[in-house]
Structures are given as structure tokens and as C-alpha cells.
Amino acid sequence: MKFDRVFWSETFKIDSVKFFDGEVLFISDVLNGENPQLRLRWVRYPKMDKIQVCFAVNGKFHMEQINYNIKKPHEWKERLWIYVPPEILPCIIAFLEKNPNAVASWV
């Protein structure tokens, strides 16, 4: 079993997120009255001595069957889209500039 430890975590309001699973498009969009949020967290796997940043999205979603494909879904190069308002970019950059290696309690 993989053990991980979340150390720093921050949540940001975003404009929308879309995820296509090959059949259904999952969408969370503020214009649709939903509340998409991007959660960033630093995670450490002690057994592997590995640190990662995790980008997670939560909020209300709705599903759409898409019938307007130009390409077949298996030919798509992208499956996930996250739309971030420019005014929160400085906050995201500040979060990413934190140095998880400097945290003494992780050692």
C-alpha cells in the first residue's frame, strides 16, 4: 500500500474545468451555477522519498453527451481542461514557489 502525506494545501476558485472520459464530458462551470475549485497540495511519499505537487479539482459537475465531435474521441490529444482566471495566477505561483524540501518534519 502506498503511504502519502499531504503537507501544504491551498484551494483556489477557478472559472471551469472539463474532463472527457471517452464517452461523456464532465463539466463544472461558474457560468452554469457550479463551483469549480482547484486544490493544490504538496504530497510526500516517505517510503519512496518522493515529493509531488497534486492538482485536484472539486465542485459540482454536470455531464454532457457530445455530438459535435470533428475527430473521434480516441484520436484526441487532450482529455482535461482547467480554465484559471488570471487574477489568481500570482497566488498559484506563490504556492508553487514553496520549497517542500525545506520542511524539517518531512525528513
Image (cartoon, rainbow, N blue to C red):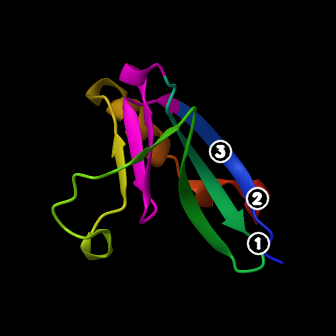
Q: Earlier in the sequence, mark 3 or mark 1?
A: 3
Quadrant of the rendering where the C terminus is positioned: bottom right
Front residue (pair 41, 95): 41
Can residue 97 be seen in this snapshot? no
The local crowd at label 1, few if under 14, some if 14 to 19, many if 20 or more residues have their Cα within 10 Å, is some
Task: Name the residue located 72 percent from the left edge and 52 percent from the top edge.
Answer: 6
Residue 82 located within the stretch drawn in magenta: no
Locate residue 48, reporting x and y percent.
70, 80
Residue found at the far front of this picture: 67
> Which residue range is magenta in the image?
12-33
Quarter-of-image position of residue 60: top right
The amino acid at mark 1 is Pro
Callouts 1 and 2 close, C-beta under 8 Å: yes
The local crowd at label 2, few if under 14, some if 14 to 19, many if 20 or more residues have their Cα within 10 Å, is few
Q: Which residue is mark 1?
A: 46
Q: Which mark is residue 101?
A: none
Distance of label 3 from label 1 (alpha carbons): 15 Å
Taking the image as shown, residue 3 lies to the left or right of residue 53, namely right
Locate residue 2, reporting x and y percent.
78, 75
Q: Secondary structure at mark 3?
A: strand
Q: Which residue is mark 3?
A: 8
Distance of label 2 from label 3 (alpha carbons): 10 Å
Residue found at the far left of this picture: 70
Q: Which residue is mark 2?
A: 5
Callouts 3 and 1 close, C-beta under 8 Å: no
User: Does residue 106 lie above or below 98 as drawn?
Assistant: below
The local crowd at label 3, few if under 14, some if 14 to 19, many if 20 or more residues have their Cα within 10 Å, is few
Can residue 10 be seen in this snapshot? yes
